[in-house]
Amino acid sequence: MIKHLFISACFPASLLPLYTAVGRAADVDYMVTSCPVIAVGTTASRNETRTMVSFGLSVQRVLKGPLFSGTVNVSHQWSGGVGGFRIGGSPVITQTIVGIWCLKPGASGGAWDVQPINGPDGLFVSMFWPAAPTLPAAYANQVQNVPSADALLFELAAGVEAAGMNPATAMGATQGAQASSVQFIANRFVASPQPDFQIAGLTALIPLQPSAIASVAALWPSISSNPHRYDLVVAIRETFRDPSPASIQHLVQLASLSPEMREAAIHAISSIHTQASLPFLASLLTSSDPKEQARGLFGLSSFANTCPAVTPANVVSMGYLQCANNGPYSTADTVANFAAPGTPSAQTVSFWINWWKQNQAALQQP
C-alpha cells in the first residue's frame, strides 16, 4: 500500500523550509510485497543531477532477496531532480547516509536501480528510510522468527531512533505488521525522553492498548507545547473508544488539560456514551459553550436510545444514528428528543436536564 506522508518526516531541519510538499511514502506491507531486494547500506557520496542520481552503496545486511555484501553501484533516472540543492554547482555531494533501500535490477548489467519509498521521485531523501548501522539489541531480539514486514518495521524504528528523525516515519509505515510489533515500538517511543517520540508512540498505541490513555496526562507537561501534539489530540478525538470506566475517568481528567484536549475528550466521551460517561455528559447540559452542551445532549440521548458508539467506520456510513431504541431507558419521548450533533432547541435541552434528574440516582449506582 502507498500512503501520503509529509516528506518533512525524513528531512533535516535545515531543509524543511525548502521542501514541504506532500510526498508518497511506502509502508512495510508495500515494501515486502513490491521490492525485489531490501537492503541496509551506507553511501558516503553521490553524483546528483536534474536527470539522475548515482552512488556506491556498501551493503551491511539484506532484509529481502538474494544475500550479498560489499559495495554495489546504484543509478536512478528521475525527472525534476533538484541537482544536489545547488544551482550550477558540482553534482558530487559528500554526505554519509545509512539507509534502508528498495533495490531492483538496473537497466545496465551489474548496476542496481533504487525505488523511491519516502516521498516524490526527484529528491534523494525519497530514496531511503533511515537505518541503524548495527541493529540495537532490543530490536535484534525482536526480529527473530517474525514475518518480514515486522522485521522491516523494527529496522525502520531503530533507524529513526539512531538518526533522530521524525518518528512518524516509522509509525506511518506500520500497515502489514502485527499489532504486537507496533505495540513494542510504540511503547519504546513513549518511554523516550523526546517529546516527538512520546507523541508518536502514544498516538499509535492508544487504539491498540487502551490502558495507554493513562500516560497522556503524565506526559502532557512535556508535550503540550510541541506542534505534533495535535496528532495525539486527533487520535483521542477520533479513534479512542474504549468503554471501560477507567478509560472514561482518564478522558474526564484529560478534559482539564487544555482547550484542544478538552474538546477532544468531550468528543470521545460523548461518542462512547456508556453509563460510566453519563455524569460527565450531564455536567455539560448547562455549559455556557453551546458546542459542549450539544455533545452532552448527544451522548445522553444516544445512551438512552441504545445507539452504537461513534467510530470512524460508522461515521462514514452514518450507522451511529441507527439506534435500537429498545433499552431500559428508551421511551417514545427519548426517541422524539434524540439530539443528533448540531444546535439543539431549548425544549430538547430542558427535556434531557429533567431526564437526568429523574434517572440520575439509578444510573449512578455502582
Image (cartoon, rainbow, N blue to C red):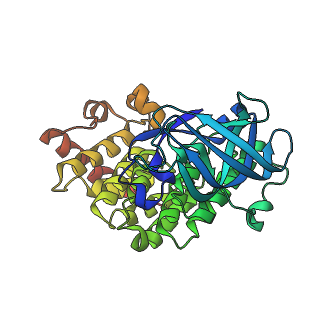
The residue furthest left is 346
Residue 187 drawn above or below residue 204: below
Pick whichever, 220 or 317, lies toward us: 220
Residue 60 drawn above or below residue 305: below
Residue at 48 percent of width and 33 percent of height = 313
How many numbered marks appear?
0
Residue 52 horizontal/vertical position (percent): 56, 36
Residue 26 drawn above or below residue 17: above
Residue 143 drawn above or below residue 332: below
Q: Can I make out residue 179 in this image? A: no
Q: Is residue 310 left or right of residue 127?
A: left
Residue 262 horizontal/vertical position (percent): 32, 59
Pick whichever, 317 or 164, lies toward us: 164
Residue 172 horizontal/vertical position (percent): 55, 46
Residue at 51 percent of width and 67 percent of height = 215
Query: Which quadrant does the N terminus fall into?
Result: top right
Pick whichever, 366 or 290, lies toward us: 290
Figure quadrant of residue 110: top right
Figure quadrant of residue 160: bottom right
Residue at 85 percent of width and 46 percent of height = 68
Q: Can I make out residue 290 in this image? A: yes
Q: Is residue 221 left or right of residue 116?
A: left
